Image (cartoon, helix red, strand yellow):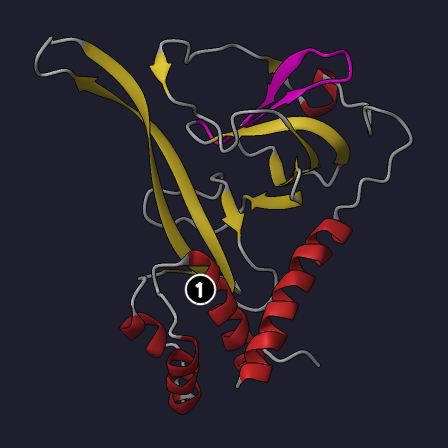
């Protein structure tokens, strides 16, 4: 079983690498595909959140990204960030002008977050079926790449708060997250507990129990759930 788990960890690393390889920046200039506001039906950026505590974005700072539009056009090495209140992409064009791409016009965006520890990638996509309060225009973070996908809905709302002592009112961003499984057009909400995942391993109960016993998995930990789902896919969706 230790060999299986080690293999899964290696597989997870390979998935992350394959994400990066699939979205390799293949450009010749500083601004990549030389994106302009006119290229993506973009509009000039307007800051609507100046007086609100917190950030409406997944990452508050611009990161280099690959953007794939709903019409298939691809732009590499673009400075961008995702607005998770409006589910729109904000970007900086090749003239240094800030703009945003309207909801539903981006099908996939892959961010490259560079730090001293290396490059970490984040993939988001739209076009998934409607579920709960999400529509097919909502962005989901993709946590694994094959078979059943584990995707995360991240929604930010603006809520008013009050200081009970001073009576002062202020607004802040509140983040709500949910996990879902997605495959073949089907969305299923995830419950982070043993019973939920045990029900998935139909006919493979012994494998599931052995895995849980050997790994002592924490069902609240998303990284461990990704590895568990890769194990699930290895049993039910093996590579040919």
154 displayed left or right of 46: left
Residue beneath the point at 38% across and 79% down: 212
Query: Residue reaching furthest left?
Result: 165
Is the residue marked by circle 1 packed among few (<14), some (14-19), or many (20+) residues within 10 Å? some
Looking at the picture, does residue 15 appear above or below residue 231? above
> Can you give x and y, in whole percent of width and height, for residue 1 in the image?
52, 86
Residue beneath the point at 64% across and 14% down: 98
Residue 95 forms part of the magenta stretch: yes
> Can you give x and y, in whole percent of width and height, for residue 37 in the image?
70, 17
Residue 239 forms part of the magenta stretch: no
Magenta residues (range) = 86-102
69 displayed left or right of 1: right
Residue beneath the point at 38% across and 77% down: 200
Which of the 4 image quadrants contains residue 97? top right
Q: Which residue is mark 1?
A: 225
Residue beneath the point at 52% across and 10% down: 46
> Can you give x and y, in whole percent of width and height, for residue 31 in the image?
81, 24
Query: Residue reaching furthest right?
Result: 28
160 displayed left or right of 158: left
Looking at the picture, does residue 97 appear above or below residue 91? above
Mark 1 element type: helix
Which of the 4 image quadrants contains residue 189? bottom left
Residue 46 seen in render: yes
> Can you give x and y, in whole percent of width and height, for residue 204 in the image?
43, 88
Looking at the picture, does residue 225 appear above or below residue 93? below
Q: Quadrant of the C terminus?
A: bottom right
């Amino acid at each position: 079983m230790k060999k299986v788990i080690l293999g899964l960890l290696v597989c997870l690393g390979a998935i992350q690498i394959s994400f990066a390889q699939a979205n390799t920046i293949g450009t010749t200039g500083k601004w990549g595909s030389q994106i302009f506001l006119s290229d993506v039906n973009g509009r000039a950026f307007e800051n609507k959140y100046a007086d609100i505590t917190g950030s409406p974005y997944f990452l508050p700072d611009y990161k280099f990204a690959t953007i794939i539009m709903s019409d298939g056009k691809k732009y590499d090495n673009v400075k961008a960030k995702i607005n998770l209140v409006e589910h729109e992409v904000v970007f900086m064009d090749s003239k240094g002008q800030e703009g945003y791409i309207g909801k539903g016009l981006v099908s996939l965006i892959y961010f490259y977050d560079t730090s001293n520890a290396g490059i970490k990638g984040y993939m988001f996509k739209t076009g998934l079926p409607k579920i709960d309060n999400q529509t097919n225009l909502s962005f989901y973070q993709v946590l694994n790449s094959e078979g059943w996908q584990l995707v995360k809905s991240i929604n930010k709302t603006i809520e008013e708060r009050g200081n009970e002592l001073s009576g002062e009112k202020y607004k802040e961003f509140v983040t709500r997250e949910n996990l879902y499984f997605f495959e073949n057009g089907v969305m299923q909400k995830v419950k982070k507990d043993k019973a939920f995942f045990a029900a998935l391993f139909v006919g493979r109960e012994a494998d599931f129990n052995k895995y849980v016993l050997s790994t002592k998995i924490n069902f609240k930990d998303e990284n461990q759930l990704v590895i568990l789902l890769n194990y699930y896919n290895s049993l039910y969706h093996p590579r040919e």
